[in-house]
Amino acid sequence: MTDWLTPAEWQAVALSLRVSFWATLASLPPGILVAYALARWSFPGKQILNGLVHLPLILPPVVTGYLLLIIFGRRGAVGQVLDEWFGIVFAFRWTGAALAAAVMAFPLMVRAIRLAIEAVDIKLEQAAGTLGAPRIWVFLTVTLPLCLPGIVAGAILAFAKAMGEFGATITFVSNIPGQTQTLPSAIYTFLQVPGGQEDAARLVIVAIAVAMTALLLSEWVGRAVARRIAGT
């Protein structure tokens, strides 16, 4: 199996896994918070927040990547501060690929978690509140365990989406072999050269295998957690 892909191709696969892992891990806490706010809270600007969350699904990925470059580039409003004050650079780094992947996968994660929270009977939360439990404790002991299958499913779907992210990533961090070249970027590179279809096909098979594994794992983990919660 190790001889099936070249070292450079394995490097692209490994980088994609690394990017997807950190993109999912970093976006999970804000994803849960935003999903809970959209599912349970009423506040001015709620529809605007909902629109901003889902905007990456509507905008062309290249536009999203361009906006990230403007905001988080070395001369961007946020990127310049992060670079000068903390030494954190996103543009043309693998960390930028993780940021782009997180932004593109965030809507899918939030939607799955929001639906899971909305499925929780609000009377259970109210009952815990009447017993004097603080709101955060009600969330941690009642809401979170009951919506855990949705959280797991949302995280895995976000991971799969991050693995396949291309447009925003290549716009924001380019396609630098060994540094920012992810699996989709490597496939694109092979398709741009004569005779590269065979190399691209191998990576396509890897991409399909990873995506299918993520989807199957999402279903299995979600059902396992649901059975455990139900006590069966």
Image (cartoon, helix red, strand yellow):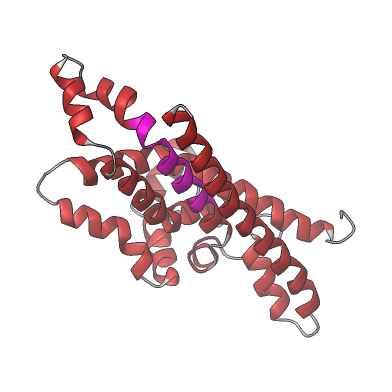
Which residue shows up at 64% across the image and 53% down it?
213
> Could you tell me residue 53's position as x and y percent?
30, 55
Residue 147 among magenta residues:
yes
Q: Residue furthest left?
A: 44
Residue 176 shows up from this direction: no
Residue 35 relative to residue 171: left or right: left
Residue 62 relative to residue 214: left or right: left
Pick the quarter of the image with the N terminus.
Answer: bottom right
Q: Quadrant of residue 27?
A: top left
Residue 71 relative to residue 137: left or right: right
> Could you tell me residue 80's position as x and y percent?
40, 49
The answer to whether residue 85 is above or below residue 18 is: above
Which residue shows up at 27% across the image and 40% down it?
36
Which residue shows up at 44% across the image and 64% down it?
65
| In-front residue for pair 171/20 | 20
Q: Residue furthest right?
A: 3
Q: Residue furthest front?
A: 232
The answer to whether residue 96 is above or below residue 189 is: above
Which residue shows up at 53% across the image and 37% down it?
224
Magenta stretch: dominant secondary structure: helix
- Count the marks: 0
| In-front residue for pair 153/17 | 153
Residue 72 among magenta residues:
no
Residue 118 relative to residue 13: left or right: left
| In-front residue for pair 59/129 | 129
Q: Which residues are magenta?
A: 144-159
Q: Residue furthest top?
A: 132
| In-front residue for pair 131/75 | 131
> Could you tell me residue 232's position as x and y percent?
49, 29
Residue 166 shows up from this direction: yes
> Could you tell me residue 227's position as x and y percent?
48, 34
Q: Quadrant of residue 212?
A: bottom right
